[in-house]
Image (cartoon, helix red, strand yellow):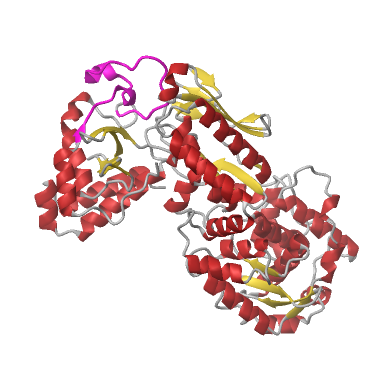
Amino acid sequence: MSGYFEISASWPEPSERQADVAEISIRLGDEILTRIADLESNTNREYFRASAVSLSLWFADNWWRLRCEPVDNTSLPSVDWRMRHELSAASGGTQWPPVMIYSGGDRVTFAPSLSRQHAAAKLRYLDTRVRTIQASQFEVGIDNFFNLVLESCAHSNDAPVLRELVDQLVVERKEPELTAWRRLEACLGYDADEAPSEVVERFLAISDRLNERDLEEAAIAAQGAHSADILESAIAASEASDVVLDFKLAERVDLSKTELAYPSPWQLAELAASQLRDGFGLHSAPISDKSLSDLLLARWDDLKATTETGRNLPYATRLRTTQSKQKVTLISTRTDAVRFEVSRLLGDAIWTDESAFGPISSAKSDRQKFQRAFAQSFLCPLRGVREFVDFDNPKSEDIRACAEAFHVHPHVVRNLLVYKYVLPPETLDDQLEVA
Amino acid sequence: MKRRLRTPPLGDDALDALSAQARHQPYAKHKRNPRAFGLEPIPGISDDPTYCDEHAGFTPDDMKRVPGLIKRGIVAGLTSEAEAKGVPRLLWSIDDNGWVYEARLTNEGQALYHGYPLLPGDPVAIKVISRFRDWAYARDSAVITQRLAMTVQAAITLADAAQGRYGR
């Protein structure tokens, strides 16, 4: 049964199933990712030809990381990350679609690979725009593909290996403890069974205080062998912090009021910021330092004075102490950056509702995207930007003037204009942030 | 099969033994014009392969260099973690013009491999280049010259050429 996401495969010559040359097409809704211009034959087609078993093995080997790990936390993903997320790594000798797949949390993104394409290739993939689907749709689509290949290629030499991997995945996805372990491994940036057990165990040891999503977000925020050290230090710094903010105003936000069926994080963030601003009568006006701290029942001077709290950490944090009050650590020093960071903390409280802990990092998960977009829209609403910037002719000096008026970095204004397609995304990083 | 370089690489004795054993078996699938290479086209529908000739500019005259390329890759430790009865299932090498080739085991009993170029979008190529460069920097120049009849500088230049082709 096909769903929104489908990988279809057909074998034009049944006798070839032993050699497994399939015509494979990848569809997301009404859109075909695998539209190809074959310059040799001067034709277009909607499939590529490759070993379906090889593709299935790659999906099975990398399932948890595809499902749980966001795009690498830099503008230049590591080769190791690319091997787990780019289709071109599936096997050598085949012209795979130049697509990378990664998770944002509850969504999975298909995006053009960040690697150089061969200019002289006579097979050109025509449409590799950034697209997202629900993670549940991704899982169903991959499961259906596995079943199709196992049924159709039962006599393939690698079929037993594929069957074993798929059966193992079924077990892992059914057992909550195994699932939690695998998800953490993937969020930490490790393949299955390759994360240091001690690191995963230390994360799980905190699970009575932090829920699974908070633990995964912390793992994503600082991947690798030192992640548990960092998380424990972050929690200790939060507990020791004298900076207490009240996020009760997060209760005024109702994200369910979106009119969009599948809103992106920035669209939800814009809604949340708008609800809060209107609720407090702020509308399109700048928010002063004092007003911002007043909203959070804090003193601005205290916020500015205590930026040492998270200075040695790779991410800022909030730690719930009562229903609405939270101890926070900050890692920024410039005033506009502190404002932005505090606003991101508020955004995280909105996104997670009842969550006890929140890292504020440069990671690319949907949760971090929401925080960034919320801070942007809350501090510098588009309605306010319009008073400074002509959308038909956006100029740098107007963007700078707007940023100064709203006491944000010019990138904030620029990003808002990119979200609204007033400015084009300059990099793939921009495109992925908007998705 | 995961396409991973064996880490750490095999020792010199094992690499020498493999180098003496490994043979190349030309495969028509990875030639846009197989007949130019004396190969019969594969009947029926093929997948969308990478082509030695069309993509990497490999010519029939270059075929005589293939044993040297296989040896180059093996000696530099560019063999896979995955094995079949003790024989690496994949080998890699870097051609003089910076193209990275992967060779797949087709007959484990005879250590027969067929090869194809990796396109610039393939992240495995970057791993191969890094391993080759590390090897070139780490090994004694006399050893490199003796084992591969090339200087250290030539090996590093080769790695740079490949990086230029496959890097960002």
Would residue B51 be counted in the magenta stretch? yes
Mark yes or no: residue B31 visible.
yes
**Residue A335 located left or right of residue A203:** right
Image: magenta residue range:
B23-52
Between A207 and A383, the one lying in front of the other is A207
Between A213 and A110, the one lying in front of the other is A213
Q: Position of residue A285 (x, y in %)?
A: 83, 64
**Count of labels in the image:** 0
Residue A337, above or below B119: below
Would residue A204 be counted in the magenta stretch? no
Which residue occupies 52% across, 31% down?
Answer: A150
**Residue B163 located left or right of residue A333:** left
Which residue occupies 81% across, 73% down?
Answer: A324
Which residue occupies 84% across, 71% down?
Answer: A248
Residue A145 in which image quadrant: top right
Between A392 and B146, the one lying in front of the other is B146
Q: Position of residue A111 (x, y in %)?
A: 57, 42
Mark yes or no: residue A87 visible.
no
Between A190 and A269, the one lying in front of the other is A190
Q: Position of residue A106 (x, y in %)?
A: 67, 50
